[in-house]
Amino acid sequence: MIVKNVEKKEKSTVTFDVVIDAAAFEKAVNGAYLKNKSKIFVQGFRKGKAPRMVIEGMYGKDVFYDDAADDLAPEAFTFAAKQEDLRVVGTPAVKAVNVSEDKELTLSFLTAVWPEATLGQYKGLEAPKAKVEITDEQVDAEVEKTRRRNSRIVTVDRAAQQGDTAVIDYEGSVDGVPFDGGKDEGHNLVLGSGAFIPGFEDQVVGMSAGEERDLNVTFPEDYHEKSLAGKAAVFHVKCNEVKENQMPDLDDEFAKDVSEFDTLDEYKASIREKLTKAAEADAESAYQSALIEKAGDNMTADIPDAMIEDQLDSMVREYDRNLQMNGLNLELYLKYLGQDINSFRAQVRPTAERRAKTDVVLDKIAETEDIQVSDEEIEEEYKKLAEQYSMELEQVKASLAKEVLEGDIKTRKAAQLIFDTGVPTEPVAEEPAAEEPAAEESAPAKKRRTSKKADAEPAAEGEAESAPKKRAPRKTAKKAEPAETDGEPKAE
């Protein structure tokens, strides 16, 4: 094989040609014939028995060229990438296939490569770091959450109040005509929850078990069901039962029931300590993320789209995995939000771009600082991963190449260098963002609880990453050689 016409293009892409001699190409063409002949019917021959020259006579001498080129492309690409020391990212593409008169094959490739980077300042960077101050109100709020979790819902013989649960039957009508979706029986309505359209819950307040009322309400002008939008409606409601949420008394006995502490004061002190540690961890993570982002912004590099797409693919899998842990999947989640996978990818693309930039800047810092990783460090990391994922040590080593693990450790050390030299500053106060109304769902009297941020990323994924994460061992080993790619070259 001969590699020629190597050219660097914009967005960190490279094109090159690989010339394969006639003998190797002929062998591949014959292999393509042997592989495909059983699928080709030629009159006068049993299926799969037609000679190659007969098939080529019927369909042309180039009938097996494309299959032969597809078979040769992976090896040709790997050979060229190693020879030219290309650090390939993404999936390469075969841009052209040409066969000369003397039957030499030329494959023209296009591939993205790891971008060349020029570092800016990455030591002594300044970034805001929040001061952690846990208030009594925050502690009390956590205590109240625990009280609510340990509360009991009991039936009461009195009129319904805000915060109660009213068990109701209802049927709605407009101009005396019932409408689809406006009827339900035995519905548990938490008064004050805002689950129904404005005015409905307020009129249920004061009803007692067995009482019936007609509630007059008006559907919002922007109601999703256009036939009901802005219309006055009457809901006939029967209250079957009134329930209240009875919470335990806030005393030492409560503390004993919900914790290992004997007194309420001790329990509150433990909550304050827990909240403080969590807030400090969040503040440190946000600070570190800001430092890395600054280092990335100070760097000059032409990040290829393939790196960003790889990050997007990884994020899609990550979101789906996290949602599955909660009994959902990404497809259902996006359907619930009224999105599709393309809008989701566009939504999280800025984070994918930051991740790609982070990978590049940390890699370049590790190279510039000549960061080294000892065999002892690698062995210790293997042991930690084996313990973390409950795997045998040798199984982890077989699943995760040493070179890959070494790269991970180097980038973590590079990140730590940024953190160790960073300078925390006072955070700048931000104005609170205005809330957007929740979207409404199909049931005419109800509202759907959805994310109030139309632009925000789904809750399954954290926005910032303070440092490279430990890589989970894979089921199969992947050698970290520069010429390897995520897939075989594909024709465009």
Image: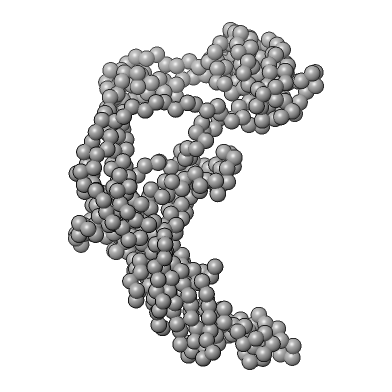
Q: Name the residue: 44% across, 79% down.
A: 18
Q: Please give the count of numbered marks on the rendered protein.
A: 0
User: What colour scheme has been applied to the protein in the rendered image?
Assistant: one colour
Q: Image check: 46 left or right of 479?
A: right
Q: Nearer the viewer, residue 479 or 411?
A: 411
Q: Position of residue 353 (x, y in %)?
A: 41, 50
Q: Is residue 405 left or right of residue 160?
A: left
Asked if residue 123 is positioned above or below residue 79 in the image, the reply reads above
Q: Report the side of 114 relative to 65 (left or right).
A: left
Looking at the image, is 351 positioned above or below residue 211? below
Q: Name the residue at 24% across, 48% down.
A: 122
The image shows residue 37 at horizontal and vertical percentages of 63, 84
Q: From the image, which quarter does the C terminus lie in?
A: bottom right
- Does the image show residue 30? yes
The image shows residue 373 at horizontal and vertical percentages of 21, 59
Q: Which residue occupies 53% across, 78% down?
A: 97
Residue 434: give x, y in percent of width and height.
47, 26
Considering only vertical position in the picture, is 245 above or below 492?
Answer: above
In the foreground, 339 or 161? 339
Report whether 450 appears left or right of 145: right
Image quarter of the N terminus: bottom left
Q: Is residue 467 visible?
A: no
- Using the image as rendered, state which of residue 481 and residue 18 is in the foreground: 18
* Residue at 22%, 41% in the rendered image: 422
| 238 versus 223 height, above or below | above
